[in-house]
Image (spheres, rainbow, N blue to C red):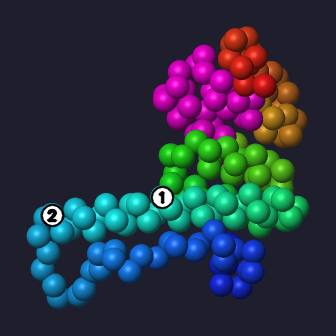
Amino acid sequence: MVDKQSDPDMHLPFNGLSDVNEPKIEAGTEYTEDEIDRIIASVKEKQIKLGECYYQQGLIKELKLKDNEAYAAFKQAVNCHPDNIEFLNAAGLSGTKVGDYEQAEQFLSQALKFSIDRFGKNHPDTATAYNNLASNLDAQGRLDEAQSFRQCIPCNAQDNAI
């Protein structure tokens, strides 16, 4: 797990994450439905921002060639925002790079599913997701499966993705 307190590279992405004006929950206090909804919305927004911070950490760690730390940060990003295709792809590619093939395959499969659901099969982002999963399968020596995923990439989407 990436620790923003002990890692000097990690302070920058977390700047501005805490907000003095955010709603606070106090024990023993009764809240209206509107107040509860506002608190929930605030927590969800913070979770998305936290995911982005972890994602940025991962990018920083990749630049510093600290692959295991990058992978840990990308996994944290996915934990914060599990339906973010960009986070899933980053975690999957990073996991493949460090040899955590099975977990990486799960991230990449989920990214592909979300990409197909959101964009359809002929979108460049979906082509990228197919290719990312195929790369993971290649790394595992599952060449026939990898090839079958590559064959799913429509030519027009593949050309646009490059």
The reply to whether the magenta stretch includes residue 119 is yes
Residue in the image at 60% along x and 16% along y:
122
Is residue 16 depicted above or below 92 in this figure?
Answer: below
Q: Amino acid at mark 1?
A: Ile
Can you name the residue that lies furthest to the top here? Answer: 155
For residue 156, what is the image quadrant? top right
Instruction: Please indicate, yes or no, whether residue 55 appears anywhere in the rendered image.
Output: yes
Give, as a single range, the part of the protein colored magenta: 106-133
- Other-residue count near label 1 (Cα within 10 Å), few / some / many at <14 / 14–19 / ≥20: some
Residue in the image at 81% along x and 35% along y:
135
- According to the picture, the residue beneath numbered tag 2 turns out to be 34
Front position in the image: 12 or 35: 12
Residue 137 coordinates in the image, percent (x, y): 79, 35
Is residue 87 depicted above or below 56 in this figure?
Answer: above
Instruction: Please indicate, yes or no, whether residue 102 appears anywhere in the rendered image.
Output: no
Judge left or right: residue 21 versus residue 70.
left
Alpha carbon of mark 1 to alpha carbon of mark 2: how far?
A: 21 Å
Look at the magenta stretch and give its main secondary structure.
Answer: helix
Judge left or right: residue 149 versus residue 30.
right
For residue 55, what is the image quadrant? bottom right
Residue in the image at 60% along x and 64% along y:
53
The reply to whether the magenta stretch includes residue 111 is yes
Q: Which mark is residue 48?
A: 1
Give the quadrant of the N terminus: bottom right
Front position in the image: 5 or 110: 5
- Other-residue count near label 2 (Cα within 10 Å), few / some / many at <14 / 14–19 / ≥20: few
Judge left or right: residue 152 versus residue 33.
right
